[in-house]
Image (spheres, rainbow, N blue to C red):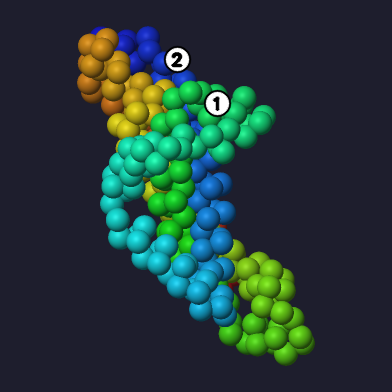
Amino acid sequence: MSGLNALVDHFDVLAKGFWSTFQFCLLIAIGALLLGAVAAIFRISPIPPLRWVGTAYVTVFRNVPLTVVLFFSAFVLPALGTNADFLRIPGLDSLVKPLGTDLPYFRFALIALSVYTGAFVCEALRSGVNAVAAGQAEAARAIGLTFTQNLRLVVLPQAWKAAIVPLGSVIIAMIKNSAIASFFGVGGMLTSRGYDLITIDNEPVIPMFIGITAGFLVMTIPLSLLLDRVERRRAVAR
């Protein structure tokens, strides 16, 4: 009972950590989707240098551990003289408080996880593009559409539908990966708040980790159920 009481007593602390983590993951998802979409376009581009850039980006970040990317972002970027101020977007930094603080680790972790996850988003989108029948693109070229028009009007709308389940899996993995950011100076997150309660306030370990686990399950299980439903509906349609 004492362990359960500790969890109830500190519910507000964990709830604030959950909200910070949710905002963090939402920003990463947006950044990763944008980067991944650009990289996917590069990878299927008819221009060789763009294909090389897209391939190099995916090859590097799919094969480098996330901890290395976070180390680089947290320690190398400051050494290069940047504190990621370009992420202090007016209006947004008032909604997501850590974006506007003088401690830049939140922004550094945001960059690291967005760039890392973007490589996996790229491959999920490319798998969706490959699922589009070749005749669709050929027909679009036959009626005179340019590569950009073909991509925007014909290929990508169908690719998004085919890639929705793989993309959802990437986002779920990203939510779980966000827990690592707490150990690179990102304060206020669900994991870091729970860890502080254990190490500073000497609260029991098991209830705190139950609270942390519950917070992540609240974010991942609804998305997982949604993906299962989408997959079942697509199977029925087929």
Query: 27 or 18: which is nearer to us?
Result: 27
| Residue under the point 30% across and 60% down | 63
228 sits to left or right of 78: right
Q: Which residue is mark 2?
A: 12
Circle 2 Cα neighbour tier, 10 Å, few/some/many (<14 / 14–19 / ≥20)? few
| Residue under the point 39% across and 49% down | 173
In the rendering, at what x and y percent does residue 17 appear?
Answer: 43, 24
Identify the element where label 2 is drawn: helix
| Residue under the point 44% across and 51% down | 115
Residue 100's tag is 1
Circle 1 Cα neighbour tier, 10 Å, few/some/many (<14 / 14–19 / ≥20)? many
Identify the element where label 1 is drawn: helix
In the rendering, at what x and y percent does residue 152 appear?
Answer: 69, 69
Q: Which is nearer the N-term, disc 1 or disc 2?
A: 2
In the rendering, at what x and y percent does residue 153 appear?
Answer: 72, 71
Query: 78 or 171: which is nearer to us?
Result: 78
Residue type highlighted by circle 1: Gly
The quarter of the picture where residue 220 lies is top left
| Residue 217 visible at all | no
Residue 37's tag is none
Residue type highlighted by circle 2: Asp
Residue 124 versus residue 212 in the image, above or below: below
**Image quadrant occupied by the C terminus:** bottom right
